[in-house]
Image (cartoon, grey):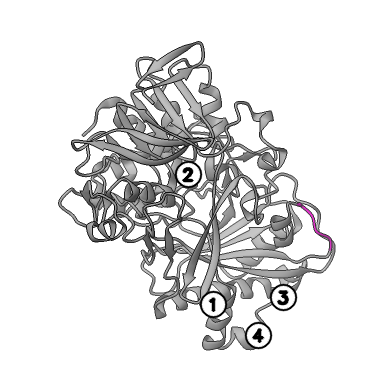
Amino acid sequence: MGQTEHGRGRVRRPDVIVVGAGGSGAVLAARLSEDPGRTVLVLEAGPVSHRPPAFASELLDARLVPGARPGHEAVQPYAVHLTPTRPYTVVRGRCLGGSTTVNGGYFVRARRDDFDRWSAVGGAAWSYDRVLPFLRALESDLDHGADALHGDRGPVRVRRTELRHPAAVAFRAAAHRLGFPEEPDKNAQDAPGFGPVPSNAVDGERVNTGISYLLGASGRLNLRVEGDSTVLGVVVERGRATGVVVERYGRRVVVCGGEVVLCAGAFGSPHLLHLSGIGPRHELESLGVGVVRDAPAVGARFGDHPQVVLEWMPRRSMPEPAGSWLGGVLHLSSSQGGHPGDLEILQSLVPLAGLMGGRASVPGAPLAFLVSVQTPRLTGRMRTRSADPATPPSFEYGYLSTAEDRRRMREAVRVTAELVGTSDFGEVSGGLTEPVVRILDDDRLLDQWVLGHLGTSHHTCGTVPMGPADDPRAAVDAYGRVHGVEGLRVADTSILPTPPLRGPAATAVLIGELIADAVRRGLT
């Protein structure tokens, strides 16, 4: 298809085609369309809502996590293996705003150490000092306002969780009892400790990037957002991306454009590259896919954060959370880890049964801590299994494959148990439901328990990593340009060389901002 309808007129061959309207894509498209001389077409596989009331109330209610609900219509499920013997289902948002519409509203910046690692391969553009202006520009911090670290004019409203709920008060006291420092602003790069969670949920409403970025730009004549448009591949002619193949309502068409930017996420973007002939030569040839660019780094590795849920029984009935399911969060450092604050204990003020069932209150149910190891590790591997776009790739996470991985997880679980066992937390808690003391005290038994309860934080990164063009471990440059293919970029968390030490939602928005700026300014 060489042209697309656009409001009151028609736009021939958009300057930029953005694939995916999620945490990065919505940001990138909105920023690029600020230039009235540039036409932008966004293609989103899921349905597109054009005003906040069109979102179902459960997609806005910050006390709920739609992505935790099995079979939710706003997510795309993927069958994966966390370990060779641990099958699991992970999800990604399939709607306007992508995963920012269905996640927990956690909006914590990456750490300075992360930017040091990323800039070592991506150059100065990824240094903390260079990205800080973008971090300030993307937010309106309702707690701090404008200062050296925070902004007050950006699209994303950020507010820290209130720690007034009895369970949050007890968590704070228990962390203090065990000697952990206060960390009142998780976005300030202070020493890791206990504090509230910066969140893009304000006054009980989760504000996704579709709302914060795209809806405000929906009146621009140079921007069009089309839903129910599944991109099946990129068209590459003589070494240049010239468009994409799109399936709409069972019909396939070709949409031509001046430049293509994949923002389909750490699962979707590498899969599209493989289907387009950009990936490891021998794997593509074995599938019968014509090789456009031998790119061994695409899908070769990825990182995420292994997680287990520890539940505890309240001594008395707990009130529903007022505005968010999130309570406090504790970051601590694993022994001999080398990455300060790489263990996270995140408090849920809604029972796990409520998160999975779409209810903010489940009388008599235990509450939970989400315990994860966030050491920046690349243990996963993605493989495209068929040239048919309808066949999903396989994902092997490789979690807990080393003694060090297992030791870190044991440490995080045992600290959580120690917190719950304090007299301070005992004011509200009758103790953990499991693991029992006998298991906690035995490394072998605790490893077995963890493997039987293992989940993931849904923080996948690194499937299309950035780095120098002569590095076989890199697939794109610092601004997301695919090595060896003109007119094609990737702009989502797949380009991060390693996962951050914190959940990547805020970093996904940063990627959209940074790459949009590079496109607008013609940076190379």
For residue 280, side relative to residue 322 (left or right): left
Can residue 153 be seen in the rendering of this structure? no
Distance Cα–Cα, label 2 vs label 1: 29 Å
Q: In this view, does 257 lie above or below 186?
A: above
Q: In this view, does 111 lie to the left or right of 175?
A: left
Q: Is the residue marked by circle 3 packed among few (<14), some (14-19), or many (20+) residues within 10 Å?
A: few
Mark 2 residue crowding within 10 angstroms, few (<14) / some (14–19) / many (20+): many
Amino acid type, callout 2: Ala
Q: Give whichever of discs 3 and 2 has the lower sequence position.
A: 3
Which residues are the magenta region? 359-363
Residue with the mark numbered 1: 451
Q: Name the residue under label 4.
A: 437
Q: What element carries label 1?
A: helix
Q: How far apart are marks 3 and 2 (CA)?
A: 33 Å
Give 175 or 497, whichever is nearer the viewer: 497
Alpha carbon distance from label 4 to label 2: 37 Å
Residue located beneath label 3 in the image: 433
**Alpha carbons under labels 4 and 1: distance apart:** 17 Å
Q: Where is residue 141 in the image (x, y as percent from the top left)?
A: 54, 36
In the rendered image, residue 301, in percent from the top left (x then y), is placed at 34, 61
- In x, y percent, where is residue 97? 54, 38
Q: Is disc 4 placed on a helix, strand or loop?
A: helix
Is 99 rendered above or below residue 522?
below
Q: Position of residue 381 (x, y in %)?
A: 37, 64
